[in-house]
Image: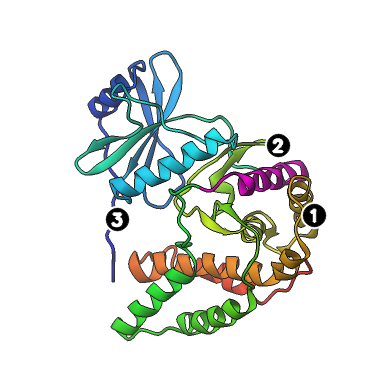
Amino acid sequence: MVIEMRRVEVGVDEANDLLNQAGLPTLNSMEILQGGWDNTNILLTLSDASKVVLKVWNANTVEEVRRVVARHCHLDEHGIPTAVPIRLANGSLIAEKEGMSWTLLPFIEGGMLGTDENSLKRLGENLARLHQIPAADCFPDDYRMGWSLFEEMFVIADEANTWSDFLIALKKESESLQNQIPDGLPQGILHGDVFPDNIIGDGSVAAILDLEEAFIGPCAFDLMMAFVGFGWNEDGPLTDRWNALLDGYESIRPLTQYERSALPALHRYATLSIAAWRYWKHVMTQPDEALKMRYLEMTERLEIGFDF
């Protein structure tokens, strides 16, 4: 199964039309923003030198976008730093054009959050706060990069009779992990993809972005995903990064002993999920010669132990 994905071309008139709907000044210049795998993100500099981001959600249905925007609103309402679309004149946060959702987002200064001690402590604190806010219907129980994705990949492999070494290993590993991760771990709203390109800040967290993968799940899983995203370099996992992340997290929400005992399996599950998503994306559904080996970064990590 191969899915064709395309970026959307945005003209000056289209950008100005949306700016007008939001009551903002006219456009001065546009610049494509790097990052993100599917949707189109454009930095708009306006005639008064202010900036906003135009996002065209070409990879998501309108209904999916409504749910994701509702998640951002929920976080914002409970004091979690994020980016909520600018409201349009008709009261909506979303404009629909040719079956796609368009949003204007505030431009948040700063790059990707660093891996210094202070940044990781602040990240841990914000994740702990996120995990303690009330649940909402816009967050599913299913993790889109986890068990359900694995099963989808197995179906594709069956139908095409293409069981690669990775898929065989994924099936064996996932069956083992499901038996290792206990039921009854404390649950909360999770981001699900805590990587530097989804966290904006400079020594502190300015915004948690991209809630497409957010779900209700075991809180400690998100902490492990943050370690997968921030805790490694080319030489392996770094104890000082883990300590900073954990110190920040437990200053707000201490882990239970039950959670601590599950950390190795949850870390393995988080690592496997990123490997699987990369394989599904760049090998199975949107083949990309330049990116098809990215999953190996994560499979190689599975061979490296860490004392949590």
The quadrant holding residue 52 is: top left
- What quarter of the picture does the N terminus occupy? bottom left
The disc placed on residue 203 is 2
The disc placed on residue 5 is 3
Looking at the image, residue 144 lies above or below residue 100: below
Q: In this view, does 243 lie to the left or right of 295?
A: right
**Which mark's residue is nearer the viewer, 3 or 1?**
1
Query: Residue placed at 54% from the left, 82% from the top?
Result: 175
Q: Do the residues labelled 2 and 1 touch (CB within 8 Å)?
A: no
Mark 3 / mark 1, whichever is N-terminal: 3
Figure colour scheme: rainbow
Disc 1 target residue? 243
Query: Residue placed at 65% from the left, 64% from the top?
Result: 185
Is 24 contained in the magenta span? no
Q: What's the residue type where badge 3 is placed? A: Met
Mark 3 / mark 2, whichever is N-terminal: 3
Looking at the image, residue 75 lies above or below residue 219: above
* Label 1 CA crowd tier, 10 Å (few <14, some 14–19, many 20+): some
Q: What's the residue type where badge 1 is placed? A: Asn
- Furthest residue to the left? 98
